[in-house]
Image (cartoon, helix red, strand yellow):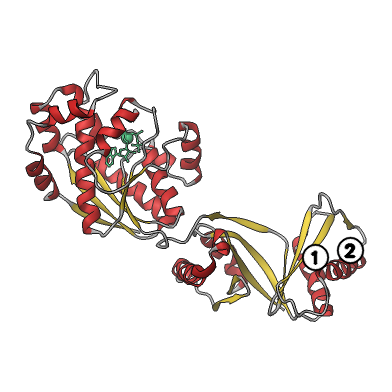
């Protein structure tokens, strides 16, 4: 008998022909996440991954592993020989250690080993009886048991009760690469998280407006990125100075177009970074109608300068729902720290809310777009996160 940690895949379980590739990717993520804790072995047994490690490290390992995308559940299990008497003895031990104050239970057996001599239902009945004999104060409740007592019959048998919920999603790197436009706000870290959760490898571009914005504001973004890296792993932040571009817009265009024109420059620069990183798309934290610049017309105007697809995972989210995720992933507190954002520099009193694309292009006609982009690219600082 041996305690091990089991890992069930989420959607991965459905991935058919690609399954091996997804599993290998996930095993790599797990190894990286727990390498510094130390473990004995990670192995596969019919559709789940298992970790052998020092039992004292289980809580730390479970806590790290549950943050990895592509995992549905993590459980502490008892691994026993498939002999039914062994399963019975293991069940008594495991129940004693893990039931706490709970009294009702139901046994649920999953038999992946189809050659096993007993049917799932017979195992449920047999082990249910063993548990009732062992714990006279316990009763079976098939409808709403306090304890779902799981038995998986694979190459070996695994017994477990509690399942810690994982993040779901897909392992990072299995859905291509994207460049996320990361501000210091609430939305863009959530957008980055959601795309990474769908298996995308993320790097970020941040625009500051030094000396109009402070160095402390930049530091805040790096701290936010560090929190994100708990989920999305190591990545790079490309920090770009937008001040010269904003000055040029302020001088050469109607001030009401400041925000939409800055956004177009952000897109152009982000696209250049994407090409350099071989990323296939851009990601923003825009949400329809949330602020004046996030009308469909505003989005159309900024979209028009990018040849790459621009993914906006929050487009249909309410702010309250975004905040809920931000709290869950622990970026919220950092996001609301009151440092200035480059978008507040030269902020017009009355920005256009429904900019027509031809008007935007007209306002931009007086600017040397290519030159401004090239100059801004020269200010890039690359910061390694995680
Ligand atoms: P956020 O909370 O992400 O800052 P927001 O509600 O403040 O979003 P906007 O300021 O309109 O909305 O920005 C919309 C999107 O444009 C952001 O989600 C982000 O992807 C991008 N963006 C805005 N400012 C910056 C910046 N300084 N650096 C990088 N990207 C930015
Ligand atoms: Mg913002």
Horizontally, residue 81 falls left or right of residue 350, namely right
Q: Which quadrant of the figure has residue 242? A: top left
Residue receiving disc 2: 135
What is the total number of numbered labels drawn onto the structure image?
Answer: 2
103 up-or-down from 113: above or below: above
State the image coordinates of residue 71 (x, y, percent, origin top left). 55, 60
Q: Can residue 346 be seen in this view?
A: no
State the image coordinates of residue 199 (x, y, percent, origin top left). 44, 57
Which numbered circle lies on residue 328? none
Circles 2 and 1: CB atoms closer than 8 Å? yes
State the image coordinates of residue 22 (x, y, percent, origin top left). 48, 67
Residue depicted at 83% across the width and 50% down the height: 143
Q: Which quadrant of the figure has residue 151? A: bottom right
Horizontally, residue 267 falls left or right of residue 153, namely left
Q: Which of 336/179 is in front?
A: 179
Horizontally, residue 264 falls left or right of residue 86, namely left
Q: Which of 124/176 is in front?
A: 176
Horizontally, residue 288 falls left or right of residue 49, namely left
State the image coordinates of residue 250 (x, y, percent, origin top left). 12, 27
Q: Is residue 224 visible?
A: yes
Query: Could you give the CA–CA distance between mark 2 and mark 1, rounded to whole angstroms?
Result: 9 Å
Q: Dot 1 lies on which element? A: helix
Residue receiving disc 1: 96
Q: Which of 76/114 is in front?
A: 114
């Amino acid at each position: 008998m041996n305690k091990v940690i089991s890992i069930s895949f989420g959607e991965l379980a459905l991935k058919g022909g690609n399954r091996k590739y997804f599993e290998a990717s996930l095993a790599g993520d797990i190894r990286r996440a727990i390498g510094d804790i130390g473990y004995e072995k990670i192995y596969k047994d019919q559709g789940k991954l298992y970790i052998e490690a020092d039992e004292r490290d289980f809580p730390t390992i479970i806590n790290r592993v549950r943050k990895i995308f592509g995992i549905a559940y993590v459980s502490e299990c008892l691994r026993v020989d498939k002999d039914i008497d062994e399963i019975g003895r293991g069940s008594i031990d495991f129940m004693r250690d893990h039931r706490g104050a709970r009294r009702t239970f139901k046994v649920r057996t999953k038999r992946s080993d189809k050659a096993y001599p007993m049917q799932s239902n017979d195992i449920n009945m047999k082990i249910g009886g063993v548990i009732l004999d062992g714990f006279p104060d316990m009763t079976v409740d098939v409808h709403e048991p306090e304890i779902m007592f799981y038995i998986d019959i694979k190459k070996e048998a695994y017994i477990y009760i509690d399942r810690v919920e994982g993040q779901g999603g897909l392992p990072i790197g299995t859905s291509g690469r994207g460049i996320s436009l990361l501000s210091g706000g609430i939305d863009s870290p959530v957008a980055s998280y959601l795309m990474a959760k769908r298996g995308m490898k993320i790097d970020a571009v941040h625009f500051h407006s030094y000396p109009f914005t402070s160095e402390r504001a930049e530091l805040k973004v790096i701290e936010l990125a560090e929190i994100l890296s708990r989920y999305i792993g190591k990545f790079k932040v490309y920090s770009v100075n937008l001040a010269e571009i904003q000055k040029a817009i302020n001088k050469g265009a109607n001030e009401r177009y400041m925000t939409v024109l800055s956004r177009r420059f952000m897109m152009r620069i982000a696209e250049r970074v994407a090409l350099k990183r071989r990323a296939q798309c851009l990601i923003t934290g825009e949400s329809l109608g949330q602020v004046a610049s996030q009308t469909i017309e505003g989005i159309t105007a900024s979209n028009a300068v990018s040849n790459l697809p621009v993914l906006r995972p929050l487009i249909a989210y309410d702010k309250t729902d975004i905040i809920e995720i931000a709290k869950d992933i622990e970026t919220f507190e950092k996001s609301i720290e009151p440092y200035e954002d480059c978008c507040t520099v030269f902020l017009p009193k009355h920005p256009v809310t429904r900019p027509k694309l031809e008007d935007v292009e007209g306002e931009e006609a007086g600017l040397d777009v290519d030159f401004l982009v090239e100059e801004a690219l020269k200010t890039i600082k690359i910061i390694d996160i995680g």
